[in-house]
Image (tube, rainbow, N blue to C red):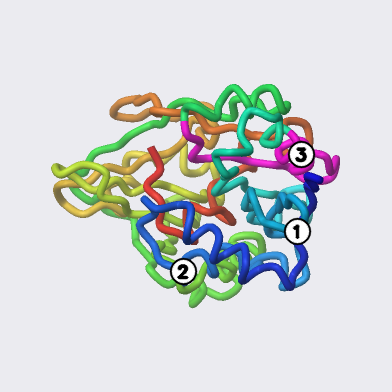
Amino acid sequence: MIEVNYARPEEREEIAQFMNDVFVRAKWDIEGWRRLLAGRWCGPEGRYAIAVRDAGRLIGVLGLVYADRMTAQGVRTTADMTSWYVLKEYRGQGIGQKMIALATSDPSVTVTNFSSAKAAVNVLIKSGLTVLDKERLVWHPRPVPAGYALHEDPLSLGDRLAQKDRKIIADHQGLRLRHLAVDTPDGLVAMVVYPQKKHDEFVTHEIMYLGDQALFARHAAQIAATVLPETAAILSLDRRFAAEGITCDEVREFATARYCQPGLLAPSEIDMLYSECVLLNIKIH
């Protein structure tokens, strides 16, 4: 008998080993899977995966990175879908749809998917997820302007940093991210940036979180100049974080759109932190 349930805390190691065995092309080892499933932002008793069993045998998993996160509306829960797999002999029976149906069944949780395989997009849409974003704004290096200062340890700024920014930055310490704040003539902009070598020619500095979106829009080119190295780099911002009046050097479309469960959070609140992307150092295309 096939059973589809949220995984229990005591199943973590078994599921980590299963993922390590079936995802043969993963660029991380068993420690990466353990890190993904550890419940960094929801605690050891929180949800972290959906498990499918046939007479007790584990035959499918869907990883879920749950987080209780600070938003403009207060604390809200998100769940980033990751690492979806069903053994080949069980495919074609609707098991995958049942897994996603369970993952999206809680009306208080916003489910996201930032790095879907193209083959899975139709299943996401059938399960009620919609396109969150499909293009990014890009800035290139330029001379650093006067009147702008870069802080590479924003937590040292104390009360100058907004409570929401401070909480988000503190939640992501120890990961391969740049935690930054830029002083502009109009105030401070906090941001979390993920440097990724997607191309041989340059490094993409992906903005994963942007504190004051309106202030960034007024000073985007100058902030990009302050944040970026002098050469071989671009700064990238998903369109949904771009406040009115923003200008950029170019616009690029994603290879695969971002997806989310609509209704609870405004798109501009759904950043790419608290996700598999930062836990596993996944390249975001």
Count of numbered labels shown in the rendering: 3
Q: Secondary structure at mark 2?
A: helix
Quadrant in which residue 40 is drawn: bottom right
Residue where numbered disc 1 is placed? 56
Q: Quadrant of the C terminus?
A: top left
Q: Is residue 54 magenta?
A: no
Q: Could you say which is closer to the camera, residue 66 or residue 9?
A: 9
Give the crowd class for mark 1: few <14, some 14-19, many >=20 residues within 10 Å: few
For disc 2, the marked residue is 30
Q: Is residue 101 magenta?
A: yes
Asked if the residues shown at circle 1 and circle 3 are in contact, with their CB atoms under 8 angstroms apart, the answer is no
| Residue occupying the point 26% across, 53% down | 146
Q: Residue at x 61, y 37 (%)?
A: 268
Residue 69: tell me if it is visible: no
Q: Which residue is mark 3?
A: 104
Tag 2: Cα neighbours inside 10 Å, few (<14), some, or many (≥20)? some
Name the amino acid, label 2: Ile
Q: Give, as a single range, the part of the protein colored magenta.
A: 98-117
Q: Residues within 10 Å of mark 3 (few under 14, many from 20)?
A: many
**Residue 19: horizontal and vertical position, in percent?**
53, 57
CA–CA distance between discs 1 and 2?
23 Å
Measure the C-alpha gap from mark 2 to mark 3: 27 Å
Q: Name the residue rendered at 73%, 52% in the picture.
A: 53
Q: Which quadrant of the view contains residue 95? A: top right
Q: Amino acid at mark 1?
A: Gly
Q: Residue at x 74, y 43 (%)?
A: 103
Comparing 263 with 143, the one in front is: 263
Of marks 1 and 2, the one in the foreground? 1
Q: CA distance from mark 1 to mark 3?
A: 24 Å
